[in-house]
């Protein structure tokens, strides 16, 4: 890894003067990125939606009631709000991690032969900054949920930029991997799937690297990300993304 090492303790939280938002024509939602403490009611709506969605699929045990109640381990969260003003999907960025034990992947691979490999993969990246995307959900409307999933898949890129870190990670069931990988994530192919939250699912691990995601992302997703970053005001080119922009333009 070539990124300069940073003290993980210096990345405890991100300070946003306001909660950036923009209209997403694909999902027909207003997308809002915020800190839980700054948008408490919006956070509560997101959490209520997560409980309802996970309960409907019988996987509510995958949720952490304590952290969802306080939001204390969440640097940022992102939601989609429809025209009626309802939260219809979202996800959160847990971290930045200060130790391997902060990662929920340790729970998900607990008791599995690959646990040591999971620990090492996370530990190797901690000095460069790691945030973990968790508690993703979307509404039941088929058309809107597909579009919103693609939009939320870009959130790891925004999280890395806003938090000034190199890596984002996520775990997801195999059947949704393709949608999440579209934004430039790379499957951790050497980590076998784990039956989490139960034997119905084969959960895999994926990573986004702020220095290389543009080489793996779907061109449409990449274009959407850069447009959104300009609206947020994170100016990707100034953050070292100028080469990525040229790569995208050449596709």
Image (cartoon, rainbow, N blue to C red):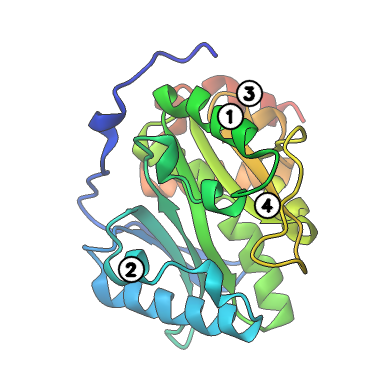
Q: Earlier in the sequence, mark 2 or mark 4?
A: 2
User: With respect to residue 221, does 78 lie above or below?
Assistant: below
Q: Identify the element where label 1 is drawn.
A: helix
Q: Earlier in the sequence, mark 4 or mark 3?
A: 4
Instruction: Find residue 121 and name its label.
Output: 1
Q: Earlier in the sequence, mark 2 or mark 1?
A: 2
| Crowdedness near tag 4: few (<14), some (14–19) or many (≥20) residues, C-alpha within 10 Å | many
Given residues 187 and 89, the one toward you in this image is 187
Q: Earlier in the sequence, mark 4 or mark 1?
A: 1
The reply, left or right, for residue 8 in relation to residue 217 is left
Tell me the residue that label 2 is attached to.
Answer: 66
User: With respect to residue 89, does 73 lie above or below?
Assistant: above
Tell me the residue that label 3 is attached to.
Answer: 246
Dot in front, 4 or 1: 1
Q: Identify the element where label 3 is drawn.
A: helix
Label 4 with label 3: CB-CB less than 8 Å: no
Q: CA distance from mark 2 to mark 3?
A: 44 Å
Residue at 54 percent of width and 73 percent of height: 61
Q: Position of residue 151 (x, y in %)?
A: 59, 59
Q: Earlier in the sequence, mark 2 or mark 3?
A: 2
Residue at 63 percent of width and 23 percent of height: 246
Q: Position of residue 162 (x, y in %)?
A: 37, 40
Q: Position of residue 217 (x, y in %)?
A: 70, 38
Q: Earlier in the sequence, mark 1 or mark 3?
A: 1
Dot in front, 2 or 3: 2
Instruction: Find residue 180 and name its label.
Output: 4
Can residue 87 be seen? no
């Amino acid at each position: 890894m070539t990124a300069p090492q940073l003290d993980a303790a210096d990345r405890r939280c991100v300070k946003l003067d306001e909660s950036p938002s923009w209209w997403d024509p694909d999902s027909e939602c207003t997308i809002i990125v915020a800190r839980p403490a700054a948008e408490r009611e919006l956070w509560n709506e997101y959490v209520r939606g997560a409980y309802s969605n996970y309960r409907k699929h019988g996987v509510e045990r995958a949720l952490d009631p304590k952290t969802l109640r306080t939001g204390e381990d969440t640097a940022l969260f992102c939601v989609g709000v429809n025209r009626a003003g309802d939260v219809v999907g979202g996800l959160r960025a847990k971290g930045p991690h200060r130790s391997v034990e902060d990662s929920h992947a340790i729970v998900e691979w607990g008791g599995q032969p690959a646990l040591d490999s999971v620990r090492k993969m996370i530990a190797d990246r901690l000095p460069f900054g790691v945030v973990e995307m968790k508690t993703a959900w979307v509404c039941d409307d088929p058309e809107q949920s597909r579009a919103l999933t693609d939009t939320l898949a870009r959130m790891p890129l925004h999280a890395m930029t806003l938090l000034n870190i190199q890596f984002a990670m996520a775990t997801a069931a195999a059947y949704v991997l393709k949608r999440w990988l579209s934004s430039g994530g790379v499957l951790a192919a050497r980590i076998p799937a784990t039956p989490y939250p139960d034997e119905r699912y084969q959960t895999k691990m994926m990573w986004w690297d702020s220095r290389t995601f543009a080489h793996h992302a779907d061109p449409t997703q990449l274009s959407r990300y850069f447009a959104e970053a300009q609206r947020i005001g994170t100016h990707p080119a100034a953050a070292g993304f100028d080469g990525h922009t040229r790569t995208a333009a050449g596709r």
